[in-house]
Every structure is written in structure tokens, then in C-alpha cells.
Amino acid sequence: MKNIILTGDRPTGRLHLGHYVGSIMKRLELQNSNDYDEMYIMIADSQALTDNYDNPEKIKNNVTEVLLDYLSCGLDPKKCTIFIQSAVPELAELTFYYMNLVTVARLYRNPTVKNEIKLRGFEESIPSGFLNYPVSQTADITAFKANIIPVGNDQLPMIEQAKEIVKKFNDIYKGNLVMPNALLPTNETASRLPGIDGKNKMSKSLNNCIYLSDSKEEIKRKVMEMYTDKDHIKITDPGKIEGNVVFTYLDVFCKKEHFKKYLNEYESLDELKAHYQKGGLGDVKIKLFLNDILQELLQPIREKRELLSKNQDELYKILQEGTEKARQTAKKTMKEVKQAMQIDYFD
Ligand code: TRP
């Protein structure tokens, strides 16, 4: 069996550090392993419109912003097919047929959707397209016969629903849809990177993000603002590591060589933590250390982004080529689905 990877993002904003550690890093690792047959990355504009139908401009503008984030992190259109969801109409067509295989009650039970309905205040006025987006996500996955879906934990209910639909389709129509599997992040912290406020997961709506495209000054300002330990007032006070955002980030981003480069009085993160817990280590010092580490990571990404953003034509060319390629694959699957469903009248 072929290994086909598919994953995607809703273009509702620029990508931030949470995306970087939660999904981009995994994609880069997969891409550079060359250990797969096909890899697709979808910019899910249709899905983004299910709860932003009244703001098409926002979605349109963020399609190229997200592409810029991908490319500047090192995702390579020669190795993975980057495409726009709405420009592959077969995905909408598949969704229409899969809708018959899911009950409305089942759609309401999806815990991620439930949570999103609450967050968006939809309550009694849920757009039916929004309620249905897990079905459209099943179309995204099955159209490409993808078996490996790298996602965060919050996307597990989508993969569960996709599996149910695939099973039902194959049972009823004697079809050949490929059963997908989620590939979850192995690092718990990385899959739920907290925002700089330390309260919640990093998220645009909570205004607690460090964006991949933030300037040097913005990054530093945000690091200096980070939540540490409210009882660590004087340098001599003992400090807490748990819930301290600076240490949570150091756990994710700090490597041994960073000490030699930026903080050579210490040899390891364990040593730094021990000193902080004992007392005598100030917040400014650990924040400046984290700032150095994040600047080192983000500077090349930002510079590449600036360069690439000057050539919008080239960006659309990448999207167009990727979309054409994706469409060929989706067309083939659509044909098979129609055959299985006996609606291939003129073939
Ligand atoms: N729902 C995903 C998110 O919000 C985006 C997405 C759309 C996706 N279709 C997909 C992810 C198919 C994986 C596979 O991040």
C-alpha cells in the first residue's frame, strides 16, 4: 500500500509558534524523510468559509499569507503538493454524497464541533455548512486516498468520523475508499503550546500569539511580557517551573548548544531550572535567554518570508500548479466513487 500524507490549515490568519511546533515541524520531518509516496498540504478555504462566510476578504488574503508561512519554514512545493480546497470542486461533490452517510445527531455529537459552536456563539443559528465540515474533511482525506493524517489532538474526532464514513461507504457501495489514520504529535507540550499569557493554548482569538512573521522587536516585547510565576517577586525568591511559560517554551525550543552561545554560566536546562527553583535567578535573565533562542529560530523564517512576499505572481503560480495536480488525483477518485454508487451514467 502507498503512504499518502494529507493535512491542511484554515486560512484565517498568519501562522504562529503553536502551529510551528504542533504541525509544521512534523510536516518538515515527514517531507525531508522522503519516506512517503505522496504528500498533500491543503489550504482549507472552503472550510474556513463555513464560519467566515460573511468575511470572504479575510479568507482570500490569508491564503497567500499561509502559503508564505509554509514556504518560509521550508515546505517545498517540489516535494509536497500545496493546493487550494475550493479550487478542487470534486471535494464539494464528494461531500454531497457522504452527507447521506451521517446523521444530524452524529454531527452534533462531534466534541470539537460542539466546542467550536460554543466558542463562536452559534447556539441555535449554526450554519449547516459548519455543522457539516467534518464530512467535507472526510472528502478532503479520501479524495487523495490519504492514509496518514498528521493532526493535533483536537482533530481526532474528525478522523473518527472519517473512518465511520469510509466504512459505511465501502460496506454499502462495495467501495475502495482508503481508511485514514491520525498521526498525532508525540510531544504533549508541543501539541498544546500555551500562549504568552500562560492561560490557554496559543490562539489568534485570544491574542496571545507569537507569529512566525513577527518583527524582532515584537518577539522581544512578547517574550518580556510572558507569564512566569506570580509569587516570584524578588530575584532571591524561589520560583516555580510548572505553569511558567518561559520554562515551558525552553522545554520545547532550548537545545544544549544554546547554553554555550547565549548563557554559558549554565550547562543544561536542568541546571537552570534548579537555580530558579532554589531562588537567585531573575525572570529577565531567563526571558532574554528565551528571546535569543526564538530570534535565532524566527529570523531566517522572517527574512525568507519578506523575500518571497515580493513576488505574488510566483505564489499564485505555486498554488495553481499544486491545485492542478491535486485535481487530477481527486478526479480519479470521483470517478471510482461514482462507479461504486452507480451514478456513472455516461462512462
Ligand atoms: N480542520 C483542520 C484545522 O482546522 C483543517 C483541515 C481541513 C484538515 N481539512 C483537513 C486537516 C483534512 C487534516 C485533513 O486545522
Image: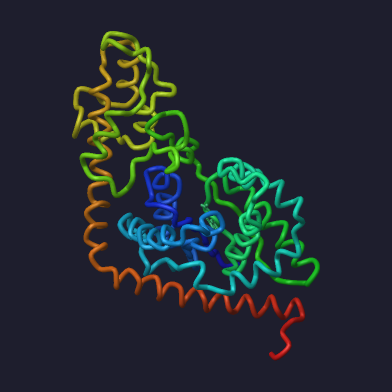
Q: Which residue occupies 37% across, 40% down?
A: 209
Residue 219 percent coordinates (x, y): 26, 39
Residue 140 percent coordinates (x, y): 58, 64
Q: Which quarter of the rendered image does ligand 1 occupy?
A: bottom right
On-image quarter of the N terminus: bottom right
In front: 267, or 164? 164
Q: Which residue occupies 64% across, 51% down?
A: 126
The residue positioned farthest toward the bottom in the image shown: 346
Q: Is residue 205 left or right of residue 286?
A: right
Residue 259 percent coordinates (x, y): 23, 30
On-image quarter of the C terminus: bottom right
The residue positioned farthest toward the right in the image shown: 172
Residue 101 percent coordinates (x, y): 76, 62
Q: Is residue 209 above or below residue 321?
A: above
Q: Is residue 296 left or right of residue 136?
A: left
In front: 264, or 177? 177
The figure's colour scheme reads rainbow
Rendered image quadrant of residue 154: top right
